[in-house]
Amino acid sequence: MEILLVVAPLAVPALGALAYAAAGWRRSTAGVAAVSAVLSLLAAAVLAGEVVTHGPLVVGALLRADAVSAFMLVVITAVAVLVAIATPAHLAAELAAGRIGSRTATWHAVLVQAFLAAMALAVLAADLGVLWVAVEATTIVTAFLVGQRRTRAAVEAAWKYVVICSAGIALALLGIVVLNHASARSGTGAGLDWAALAGASAHLDPGVTRIAIVLLVVGFGAKAGLAPLHAWLPDAHSQAPAPVSALMSGVLLSVAFYAVLRIKVISDGVLGPGFARALLLAAALASLLVAASLLIAQRDYKRMLAYSSIEHMGLLALGAAVGGPLATAAVLLHVLGHGLAKTVLFLGAGRVLQTTGTSRIAEVSGLAARQPVLAGSIGLGVLALVGLPPFSLFASELGIARAGFGSGIGWAMAVALLLVVVIGAALVNHTSRMLLGPPREAPGAAPVPRPLPRTTAVALVTGLLACVALGLSTGPLADLLGAAAEILSGAP
Amino acid sequence: MHGIEMLNLAAGGLLLTAVLVLWRRELTVIVRVFGLQGVALSALVAALAWDESSAELAMVAVGFLVLRGAVLPWLLRRALAGAGPVQRETRPVINVATSLLAAAALTLLALAVSRPLVDLAPTPASRAVPIAIAVVLIGFLVLVTRRHAVSQLVGFLLMDNGITAVGFLTTSGIGLVVEIGVALDVLLVVLVLQVLTGRMREAFGDTDLDELRELHD
């Protein structure tokens, strides 16, 4: 039973991938992804209940589910449900427009399921090495999804994505090798099992561990889109098809950041909290600065959303730098809120791209008059992203800021807050230009506004409602968040 | 101490081949040198296997000889085969003389930063760790300063060879499951990038990454 609970979130999408590989993408199989996502979400919810009441579940030497893993699984599967609801309409429109063939649609379905399985493996891994293999596997399966459209820009984005992420993650592998050296000489037999490593921290050599931590944070930080190795992100996220952008921005970045959170526990145990804090603060402020400076004059709305993801990863790093149970719980809540809001926005942006044929902000105007539901969802989604109440991002940003001002790094919080305000203003300004204003009179054939597919509307509204509900109360998630934050802040 | 001599020779081979990749500009030569580095890495693991009389390590050495000495270079040659007459790294971001100076500086840097690693367990094997770290850094240098798709790919693989060498020189690898996972991932990355070079050729008619200029802010 326990084994089944832990393996289900991993096995269900893996079976989904096999089903699509065997049967292909067609009208009758379009629902498989949704079934797979809902089943995984249920499995994650049951697992979460189990670990909160009975503590971590261990399967063999390689898999372990504790509150943090269960929470990340909830994030992954919740976003996967929204994406699965919206994907059939997206692919149908792409097929109808002749931008992709049925073979590509099948590949898309197979790779997305494999992608979900790889992310589930990453958060369930008990061993840093397995975690690394899973994170690198996400790069491999998403490479073709990014390059799916085969245009010059798409191929370029895929190349940069694979090269920068693989090189970044190679640094993390070096970090793992170095940490393994420290672990082997500590005489504790901890190996690379992160829970054992956290317990054995008194025996690890600080000099060697310091090298390992720097490499690990920079390496997984690259995959999480943190500066300085963020250059791939705007390209990949803007070129990938909308459902894939949603998964990459909404959850993949957070899964990579989850690795950083786990590493921080080890670092705090061996080197004290100051070392990881300094690294994370530098990455956080650099990421916020990059996002702010490139958002002000942004002309492409998908790239705008991608830079906003860099901003939010910066905020996560900031919260992690603050540390402690309160800030960590806020960071985890922010992961979920950002995942939901960003998914709504990328799905919406994908629909805008399909109906207008352009990703330039200036060429989309008066969306509110033509497509009120779509425009409303995008507008509300951006307000959620900016951190306005009642959306959950308000609560989590407030939590991070309060903990930060109380922990002696007020100067960094002040700088970060200023940058967040600048970013918020830029986002609202760009979005209002798209939504408001007179409907654009396209020269020649004016695109006839097609009605928003009902499934897409359901995904957008559900995502926003979930974000609001979380903002009002974390409800049944509160215990899970508390337990996870305790594990990540190194409390016994 | 036959094993240790062979170990030092193999480690020297790793560094020498990395420097040769920086020095030469013909892509076919670069790929051949990369294959030689795979052989050197395999010899290094074989020396460790000899030293510890470990059958498992000996099998790993054979695996490396196949994967890194033969399969990966073969895949790279295939990526080159379709590339047409342009077989040279035409304009590296920094020229060859400067690259070699940078490699010397990186080797010194590797010696400095890996001191704690050597001090932790001063065995003959871990004394060679700085060399492996230098190979990682030189691989990174190739990756960021070369403009041809295949050269960048070789840079990434040099990094990977160096990291693997660090792993075997410090401890006997990082566990079989992870080791196999890593090897599989590297193989798949190379396959993905090989397919992408093919698509690049379709889209740009070339694999010179100078053409990658569409996306920017």
Image (tube, coloured by chain):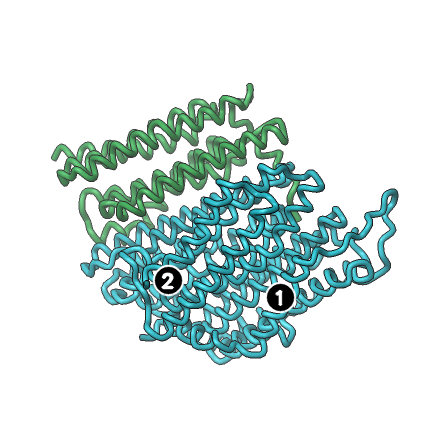
Q: Dot 2: what SS?
A: helix
Residue at position x 35%, y 38% in the image: B161
Q: Position of residue B117 (x, y in %)?
A: 27, 51
First in sequence, mark 1 or 2: give its number: 2
- Extreme residue toward the top, this view: B85
- Extreme residue toward the bottom, this view: A406
Nearer to me, A313 or B175: B175
Colour cyan, chain: A
Q: Which label number is shown at residue A5?
A: 2
Eyeballing the image, is A127 above or below A399? above
Q: Position of residue A280 (x, y in %)?
A: 46, 63
Query: Residue at label 1?
Result: A462
Is residue A55 rendered to the left or right of residue A469? left
Residue B213 visible: no
Q: Position of residue B196 (x, y in %)?
A: 54, 34
Task: Name the subunit of mark 1.
Answer: A
**Badges 1 and 2, same chain:** yes
Residue at position x 46%, y 58% in the image: A255
Nearer to me, B4 or A421: A421
Instruction: Determine crowd level at label 1: few under 14, some 14-19, many 20+ residues with C-alpha closer than 10 A.
Output: some
Gap in angstroms between the C-alphas marked 1 and 2: 26 Å
Question: Which quadrant does the N terminus of chain A fall into?
Answer: bottom left
Q: Position of residue A186 (x, y in %)?
A: 21, 59
| Tag 2: amino acid | Leu
Colour green, chain: B
Instruction: Determine crowd level at label 2: few under 14, some 14-19, many 20+ residues with C-alpha closer than 10 A.
Output: some
Question: Which quadrant does the C terminus of chain A fall into?
Answer: bottom left
Eyeballing the image, is A201 above or below B217? below
Q: Dot 1: what SS?
A: helix
Residue B81 visible: yes
Q: Which label number is shown at residue B10?
A: none
